Image (tube, rainbow, N blue to C red):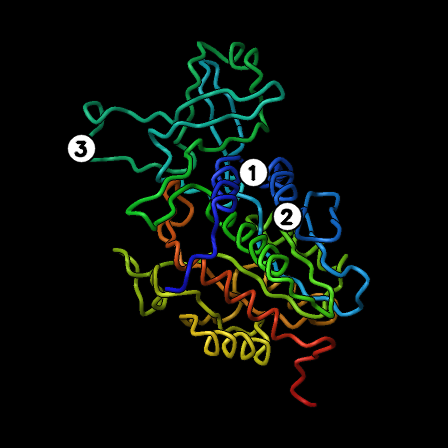
Amino acid sequence: MAKSILNKKSLDFLEKYLNNAAPTGYEWDGQKLWMDYLRPYVDEFITDTYGTAVGVINPKAKYKVVIEGHADEISWYVNYITDNGLIYVIRNGGSDHQIAPSKMVNIHTKDGIVKGVFGWPAIHTRDKSDEKAPKPDNIFIDIGAKDKEEVEKMGVHVGCVITYPDTFTVLNENKFVCRALDNRMGGFMIAEVARMLKDNKNKLDFGLYVVNSVQEEIGLRGAQMITNTIKPNAAIVTDVTHDTTTPMIEKKTSGHAEIGKGPVITYAPAVQQRFRDLIIDAAQEKNIPFQRAASSRATGTDTDAFAYSNGGVASALISLPLRYMHTTVEMVHREDVENVIRLIYESVLKIENGQKFSYFD
């Protein structure tokens, strides 16, 4: 492993950024933190109506390259309040109902956070011959209220968004663990690329757009909006992908990826082949370890939104392997984080102003 590129300031920002809640549709507080950190490394910012934030280097350049992650995290909405003060929920993004029972929650209200718990019947009271599994229609939140009126007096109403309060920790010195690593790690990593460009005094002859998109978790919506604003020529997207070495994952269908083994470079219809080859060349030239993955149709990431916009944008996907996606204990390896940053950085430096990545030139 090369010398660490993450400094104390970087890691302090990462912890603060992860610990802040930024559920889909409510990303702005996290975006403000991100922009404050990025400010010394870019020339200007672009923001849009729904909260996507973009730091721009060389904003007057005609040729535009995007590096992108997404800012939002999965969450729940208050959907129904019973007469005796219990709260039923619906998903905001791909929240996992099976991990909910016994979890603490934060309900976001106009006047601040209301604490609650996902309750579940005690093991003593359940019918062992007919165990009920947690399902979206039977999990519920208890905020200690005696009835619906008291719930509403506490500021909780239908439509309030609900997040988990789990915070950042490090296991065994090099495993980062938190909720919302998917995909605040992406926003962190692209910000670190901008910092490295500034620290190393690299001069780009094209515009670099450091994009932290919103609403990826409900259909790539933020990327769809901002790509039409920027109209880029090329885009490198970074997101997380599954470590498939943990139990109950079938490698024959999910492929093989493992934390600690490097960034994952994706092969897919949305990934422009010559642009991907540039990234692989960068990895090999700089001895950056990497893994490969294939997606049969869509990548399921913002890569798809950029690739098929504006008549076609040369796009590529560099993923960070992660364990336990969409839980409160998502886990990544520090070395992978650093190598994703290095790979995006080195790939940006290989891009030539005006490069078309054409198959026909």
Of the numbered discs in the image, which one, if any, rests on residue 38?
Answer: 2
Badge 2 crowding class, 10 Å Cα cut-off, few under 14, some 14 to 19, many 20 or more, is many
Q: CA distance from mark 3 to mark 1?
A: 39 Å
Q: Which mark is residue 128?
A: 3
Q: Secondary structure at mark 3?
A: loop
The label nearer to you, 2 versus 3, is 2
Can you give x and y, in whole percent of width and height, for residue 247 in the image? 25, 55
Left or right: where 286 falls relative to 47:
left
Q: Is residue 165 above or below residue 246?
A: above
The image quadrant that residue 347 belongs to is: bottom right
What residue appears at the point 49 percent right and 40 percent down from the top-left corner?
Answer: 12
- Secondary element type, mark 1: loop
Q: Which of disc 1 and disc 3 is earlier in sequence?
A: 1
Mark 3: amino acid: Lys
- Residue identifier under label 1: 22
Locate residue 223, reporting x and y percent: 65, 55
Q: Are marks 3 and 1 in contact (CB under 8 Å)?
A: no
Nearer mark to the viewer, of 2 and 1: 2
- Which residue is found at the position 75% from the left and 59% from the top? 230
Residue type of the residue flagged with mark 1: Ala
In the figure, is residue 313 to the left or right of 180? right
Question: Would you call the spot at circle 3 few (<14 residues within 10 Å), some (14-19), or many (20 or more)?
Answer: few
